[in-house]
Image (cartoon, rainbow, N blue to C red):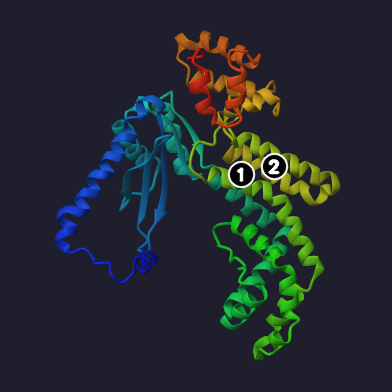
Amino acid sequence: MIKGACAYGPTYVVPSYRNLRGSLIPGKKVDVMQYVTSIKATWGITGCTIMSDSWTDIKKRSWVNVIAYSPGGGVFMKCIECGINRLTSTFLFNEISDVIETVGPNNVVQFISDNGANFSSCGDILTGKWRHLYRTKCATHGINLFLKDIHKHVKWVSDVIEDGKLVVDYIHRHTGVLALMRQFTNNKEIKKPCKTRFATHFLMLQSLIVVENELRLFVASSKWRSFQFNRAEITVRTIGIIQSNTFWEGAKEVVAFMEPIIRILQLVDGDGSTAGYLYEATERAKETLRKLMENDGEKYLTIMDLFVARLEKNIIHHVHVFGAFLNPSTLYEGRLDVEGSKFMDAQDFILDTMVPLEDRAQFMKEIVEYRMKSPRLFNLTGQTMMKTNHPRIWWQFIGGEFPVI
C-alpha cells in the first residue's frame, strides 16, 4: 500500500469518509459479488472442492476457514470461530456439512484438509454421508512434513542445515556485517529460514551456494577483520563453516536431492489443478533418489524410506494415480507403467466412488479404448493439444465422444 501511494505521488487525494461509505466501498462490493456469482455459476458444470484448515490468532482463539475452489477460482465460504467448542471431528462435520448443503452436495467433488486426526475423521464422516465425495490430504502439508522428517532423522542433512543457519543468523544479526556482505555479493541476499516451513532450509542453502566465492572472500578481507566483535567464538565458528570445503560440498549435495522435492512443493502450492501431474512428479523424485542410492545407498536409504512413507500416508491418493493415467501425454508417451496394480486399484476406486451404476459399462468401454490410444482421441489435433494444454482442457475439446470419462 505504501509503495503504491509513493508511486502515485503527492497529488493523490485520500477519499473522504463519505465517499468511501457512500460509493467506493459499496461499488467494490457489487463487483466482488458479481465475481463470486460468476464462479458459483460454474459449479454445476465442473464441480468444486471444499478446502478447510484451522488456525490460531494472536489472542489464542481457534478458527476454521472453509473455501470452495473450482477451475473458475476460489470463494471464501465461512470463517468459524470455535470459541468454547473443542475442535472435534463432530464439530467440524456439522460446520462443513452446512457449507456443503449451501453449495449443493451434487456440486461438491472432494474435501481437502490438513493432516490432523480431527480433520481425517471429519472427512471420513463426510464421505460416509455423501458417497460420491472423496477426501484428499493437503499435499503441501505432506511435503513439508517429509522435509521435517529429514531434518529430524537424517543427521548429515541436519548438520549441513544447522551450519547454514548459523552463518545466515550471524550475518543478519549484525547490520554492519550485513551491509558489508552486500558490497561483496553485489547486493545478492542470503535467505533466512522459517521455523515452520522446512522448504525454506533448501532456499537458504541455495542462496548461500550462489554467493559461496563472495562469502569466502568476505571473511578473508581486511574489512571483515576490522569489526571488533569478530574475535568472538561464534565468529570463529562462522568463519570455519564458510571456509570449509566439507560444508559447501554437503550443501550442494542436499540441494541436489531436494530440488525435485521442492519442484513438487511448487507444483502443489500454486494455483490450478495439479491432480494430473502430482503422481508423475513424485515418481520422478523417487527416480532421482534411486540413482543417488546406487552411489551411496547407506546415505540415502533412510531418505527414500521417509519419502515413500509420506507419499503413502499424506500425499498420494487414488485420484492422483488415476489423474496421471488420464493425463494424455503421460499415457501416449509411455512415461508411466499404467498396467501396474496401483493404476488398477485407482481405477476401481474411481469406478466405485464417482461412476453411477448405469454408466459403469460405458466407462470401462471408454477406458479400454483410451488405453489402446484410440485414433479418435490421439489424432493430429489431440497430439498437438496434449503438449500445450491442461488435461482437463484436452478432454473438454478432444474427448467429446467419451462422455463418461
Instruction: Provide residue 10's location: percent of width, then percent of height.
Output: 30, 72
Figure check: 273 above or below 152: above
What's the residue type where badge 1 is placed?
Ile
Measured as percent of width and height from the top left, residue 229 is found at 65, 88
Q: Position of residue 352 (x, y in %)?
A: 51, 18
Q: Amino acid at mark 2?
A: Ala
Q: Label 1: how many residues lie within 10 Å, few (<14), some (14-19) or many (20+)?
A: many
Q: Which corner quadrant holds the N terminus?
A: bottom left
Q: Quadrant of residue 283?
A: top right
Judging by the rendered image, the residue that carries numbered circle 1 is 264
Question: Residue 200's quadrant in the figure?
Answer: bottom right
Q: Residue at x 43, y 23 (%)?
A: 131
Pointer 1 with pointer 2, Cβ within 8 A: yes
| Residue 278 screen position, x and y as percent | 59, 37
Q: Residue at x 67, y 76 (%)?
A: 184
Q: Is residue 378 above or below residue 32?
A: above
Asked which secondary structure carries label 2, the reply is helix
Of residue 113 and residue 224, the one placed in the foreground of this image is 224
Q: Left or right: 86 with respect to 360?
A: left
Residue sitting at 62 percent across and 37 percent down? 312
Q: Which residue is depicted at the point 58% across and 47% down?
A: 265
**Which residue, given by chain and number where applicable, does mark 2 sit on?**
285
Note whether 126 is above or below 76 in the view shown: above
